[in-house]
């Protein structure tokens, strides 16, 4: 059995990659509004929380269904759509619907939303 991934991105890596300084460096700038500190990092290392989407199954064991569902049905379809948007390509109605779903769920993924 493969090991569960416990570091979950509450902001998608592909979305964060859009904020990198350039594609070859894969560097982005992170700013902590509480500490007022800014530092360079990469999408793989930011916007992560341990077991963020993990829920217990009926036996009480960790279950990653939610994380897997969001990845497969929301994030993966949105990635090529974002690339189209960056190239100013016209989106189909279905692409607009899928990307709207991604944006709406991204709003609820952030930690501040969970604390409300």
Image (spheres, grey):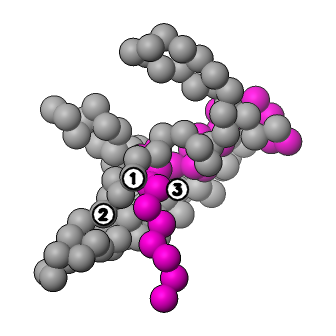
Q: Are the residues flagged by discs 3 and 2 in contact, CB closer than 8 Å?
A: no
Q: Which span of residues is magenta-colored?
A: 1-24
Q: Residue furthest top?
A: 36
Q: Which mark is residue 50?
A: 1
| Dominant SS type (magenta) | loop
Q: Residue furthest right?
A: 24
Q: Which residue is mark 2?
A: 54
Residue 47 appears at what percent x and percent y? 48, 40
Q: Nearer the viewer, mark 3 or mark 2?
A: 2
Residue 13 appears at what percent x and percent y? 57, 49
How many residues crowd around disc 2 within 10 Å: few (fewer than 14), some, or many (20 or more)? some
Q: Residue at x 59, y 17 (%)?
A: 38
Labels 3 and 2: the sequence-earlier one: 2
Q: Quadrant of residue 57?
A: bottom left
Q: Secondary structure at mark 2?
A: loop
Q: Secondary structure at mark 1?
A: strand
Q: Residue at x 41, y 70 (%)?
A: 68
Asked if residue 11 lies in the magenta stretch, the reply is: yes
Q: CA distance from mark 3 to mark 2?
A: 22 Å
Asked if residue 83 lies in the magenta stretch, the reply is: no
Q: Nearer the viewer, mark 3 or mark 1?
A: 1
Q: Which residue is mark 3?
A: 78
Residue 4 visible to an observer of this rendering: yes
Q: Residue at x 68, y 27 (%)?
A: 40
Q: CA distance from mark 1 to mark 2?
A: 9 Å
């Amino acid at each position: 059995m493969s090991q569960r991934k416990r570091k979950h991105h509450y902001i998608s890596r592909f979305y964060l990659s859009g904020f990198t300084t350039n594609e070859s460096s894969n560097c982005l700038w992170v700013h902590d509004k509480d500490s007022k500190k800014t530092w360079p990092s990469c999408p793989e290392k930011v916007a992560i929380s341990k077991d963020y989407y993990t829920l217990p199954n009926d036996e009480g064991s960790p279950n990653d269904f939610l994380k897997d569902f969001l990845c497969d049905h929301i994030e993966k379809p949105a990635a090529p759509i974002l690339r189209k948007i960056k190239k100013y390509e016209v989106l189909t109605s279905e692409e607009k619907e899928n990307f709207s779903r991604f944006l709406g769920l991204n709003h609820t993924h952030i930690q501040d939303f969970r604390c409300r």
